Amino acid sequence: MKIAICDDDKQLRKNLRHLIEVQLDFMALTYEINEYDSGISLLKHVDKKEPDILFLDIEMPGIGGMDTAKSLRNLGKKMLIIFITAYPDYVFQGYEVHAFHYILKPYEKTKLKEVLENAIKELSSQKNQFYLVQQKSGIIRLNLQEITYFKSDKRNIYAIQKNGEQISFYEKLNDVEAELPDFFQRIHNRYLVNMNCISRLESNFCICNGEELPVSRTYKQPLAVAFAKTMLN
């Protein structure tokens, strides 16, 4: 996990870093923390050391924290931004840059612990929304929300997307299933479906994103239970 602290006050950076390290050590997490004394410095190094979580001071000379955050979003950076400020007046501006949270100065240990734990949970949730595919040309990151189902044909796997496009790769379907979040369900020896894409369930088939897919007897009952839970949610 990579964390960055951007604050022009050296002592405040030191204090915040200590509190973060104590919490992450307690959670037995592996981490790297980088410090920046200005928005310019952060923007200069963000491509090489892009953090997962950024603690960003709003009131900084030169490029302020809010403008720094806007620049990061314009560059397509997706890190969780936690603003640090002595004033609560910036909360609504934070919506423009999809700020994850705010921490008011002076830092409260309990508040920092709460925000940091929630940020880590969010990162974990985000990672579960993607599947990495290794191909000769490189690694492709598939957005699981855009995948309607995975289909196996011998040792080839086809990831079918909502727009109809498909990506093929060499893997066992059992191994793919082991890495997917709970909203993917096995319906057949050759099919894994995104439960959020199923609109209809029959005795021997289901409708997934408008397409009819076979449901085998083995998976019929657990699929019915998963479909009911999806409908309730």
Image: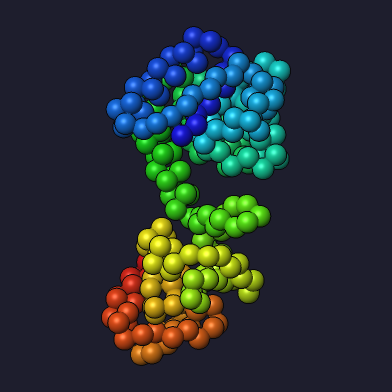
Residue 36, quarter of the rendered image: top right
The residue shown at (49%, 9%) is 11
Image position of 8 (left or right of 30): right
The C terminus sits in image quarter: bottom left
State whether residue 87 appears in this view. no
Image position of 76 (left or right of 158): right
**Residue at the bottom extreme of this rendering:** 203
Depth check: 14 or 12 in front? 14
| Image height of 42 relative to 181, above or below | above
The image shows residue 92 at horizontal and vertical percentages of 57, 38
The image shows residue 90 at horizontal and vertical percentages of 57, 31
Instruction: Please say which color scheme the image uses.
Output: rainbow
Depth check: 12 or 22 in front? 22
Residue 31, quarter of the rendered image: top left
The image shows residue 6 at horizontal and vertical percentages of 57, 22
Depth check: 150 or 17 in front? 150
| Image height of 8 relative to 150, above or below | above
The residue shown at (51%, 20%) is 86
The residue shown at (44%, 53%) is 128
**Residue at the top extreme of this rendering:** 11
How many numbered badges does the structure rendering display? Answer: 0
State whether residue 13 appears in this view. yes
Residue 22, quarter of the rendered image: top left
Image position of 207 (left or right of 94): left
Depth check: 98 or 211 in front? 211
The residue shown at (48%, 76%) is 154
